[in-house]
Image (cartoon, rainbow, N blue to C red):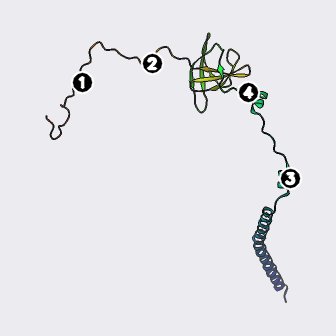
């Protein structure tokens, strides 16, 4: 045989061998993945069927009593009162603007009025803690104080008294079409 023929045969057989090997690898990859997943599933189901030794030890641990919430509140500087006391600050709440984003409160003192946000320090030393539609909550000396909206002295809507006696209301049919059976 000639050298050229031998090289062609060897190249062809080498190429054929590599093509066959790559197809076997591509086939073996998903098959081995499927076998691995079946094995993991079987292990998982066996683990679920048998009781875990950790569960037996957990049942032997005594149940702890719940902590007293009043003690925790005192440790963190919170009060356990249900309703805050009225504020002793020389401030008046004139308006509160409550929104989902940034709420503000218009507070007035002897120097004038100013808008405050939650977390700002007020002139008397307390901190604005929460803004609600009709009141604000202040944090003063470790307790919550309530500052309610100042009631307005003047009424928003005033009644009008008429000097003329009320006249009976008459309706005219001039602009209305008559119905059948209605006098014109």
Locate the N terminus by quadrant: bottom right
Residue 22 at x, y percent in the picture? 78, 74
Q: Secondary structure at mark 2?
A: loop
Residue linked to disc 3: 57
* Mark with earlier residue (1, 3): 3
Residue farthest left in this picture? 184
Residue linked to disc 2: 156
Q: What is the total number of numbered labels drawn onto the structure image?
A: 4
* Mark with earlier residue (1, 4): 4
Is residue 132 left or right of 174 when viewed as pictured? right
- Residue at the image point whose x is 23% and y is 22% from the top: 168
Locate the C terminus by quadrant: top left
Residues under numbered marks 1 and 4 in contact, where contact means CB atoms less than 8 Å apart: no
Residue linked to disc 4: 78
Q: Secondary structure at mark 3?
A: helix
Residue 83 at x, y percent in the picture? 65, 25
């Amino acid at each position: 045989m000639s050298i050229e023929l031998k090289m062609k045969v060897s190249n062809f057989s080498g190429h054929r061998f590599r093509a066959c090997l790559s197809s076997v690898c591509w086939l073996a990859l998903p098959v081995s993945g499927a076998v691995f997943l079946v094995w993991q599933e079987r292990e998982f189901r066996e683990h679920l069927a048998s009781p875990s030794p950790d569960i037996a030890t957990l049942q032997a641990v005594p149940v702890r009593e719940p902590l007293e919430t009043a003690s925790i509140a005192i440790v963190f500087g919170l009060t356990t009162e249900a309703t805050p006391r009225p504020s002793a600050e020389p401030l008046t709440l004139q308006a509160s603007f409550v929104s989902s984003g940034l709420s503000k409160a218009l507070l007035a003192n002897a120097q004038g009025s100013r808008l405050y946000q939650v977390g700002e320090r007020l002139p008397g030393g307390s901190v604005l803690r929460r803004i609600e539609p009709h009141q604000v909550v202040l944090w003063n000396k470790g307790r919550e104080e309530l500052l309610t909206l100042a009631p307005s002295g003047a009424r928003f809507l005033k009644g009008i008294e008429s000097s003329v006696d009320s006249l009976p209301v008459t309706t005219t049919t001039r602009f209305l079409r008559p119905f059948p059976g209605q006098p014109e």
